[in-house]
Amino acid sequence: MLGKTQVSRRLTVGLLTSVGLLMAACGSSNNTVGTTTMTQGATAHASTVPTTAPKTTTAPPTTTTAAPVVPTGIQIGPGPLPRYSDQPQPASGSCHYTYVGSDPLPDPNCTPGAINPQVTQGNIGSTMCHSGYTSTIRPPSDVTQVEKIGSAAAYGYTGSLHTAEYDHLISLELGGDPNDPANLWVEPNDRPNATSTNNTKDALENRLKSLVCSGQITLAVAQQAIATNWVGAYQKYDT
């Protein structure tokens, strides 16, 4: 049998052990509750914080300049220059006129026509259709007079240079190049007893400009018509 002292000691140890186990269990439970509470609190807090969509940057639209539409067989000239100089002409006697009645056509091998790359369908309002535009790009007479003599020799023209026009095949008012030899020729006057360079082609140039600027035909159509066969274009458009 155990003595009273031993029984008392065992009871004390057992009681202490039970108390320790109970405290440990309570501490674990509190920690779990605390963790759960903190987690729920964090979740609730996160759900109430307003979210801001990330900023997006939209690139500005790209602006491009449309290239000129080049009609078949026509060249692209250098365009207006700050200073013009005499341009070499085809060899003497190498170019030949073709006549439709009394109306002369240039040699397409010498004068196929050349456009001014600065005039496009998209900017006709500020270029060829703008009043006074051609005077700002026209070469001076001291340059064109020398070229005219050379062009007359190339075409074998022996008539009066006073009534023959040194003509832009595609006129400046239709976006023709100002001083490219491919766009210039000595045009014999088709009008009997002419006393100036005014001729039938001049009327066509004005008519085509009116049609382009009013949107009735495109610039490329007008350029093709006058460069290919200005006589045929006159019969078609000059009404």
Image: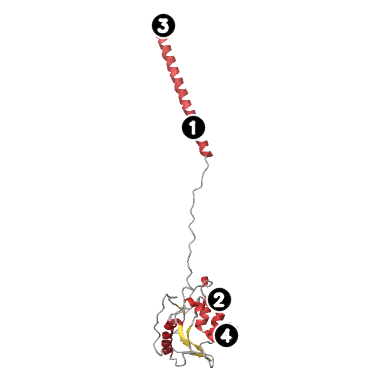
Amino acid found under the numbered disc labelled 1 = Met
Q: Quadrant of residue 94?
A: bottom left
Camera sees residue 10:
yes
- The residue to which callout 4 is attached is 235
- Identity of the residue furthest to the right in this view: 239
Q: Nearer the viewer, residue 239 or 195?
A: 195
Q: Quadrant of residue 129?
A: bottom right
Amino acid found under the numbered disc labelled 2 = Val
Residue at disc 1, secondary structure: helix
Q: Nearer the viewer, mark 3 or mark 4?
A: 4
- The residue to which callout 1 is attached is 38
Give whichever of discs 1 and 4 has the lower sequence position.
Answer: 1
Q: Nearer the viewer, residue 73 or 102?
A: 102
Q: Position of residue 210 (x, y in %)?
A: 57, 78
Q: Nearer the viewer, mark 1 or mark 3?
A: 1
Camera sees residue 1:
no
Q: Residue at x 43, y 16 (%)?
A: 16
Q: Which mark is residue 212?
A: 2
Q: Quadrant of the image for the C terminus? A: bottom right
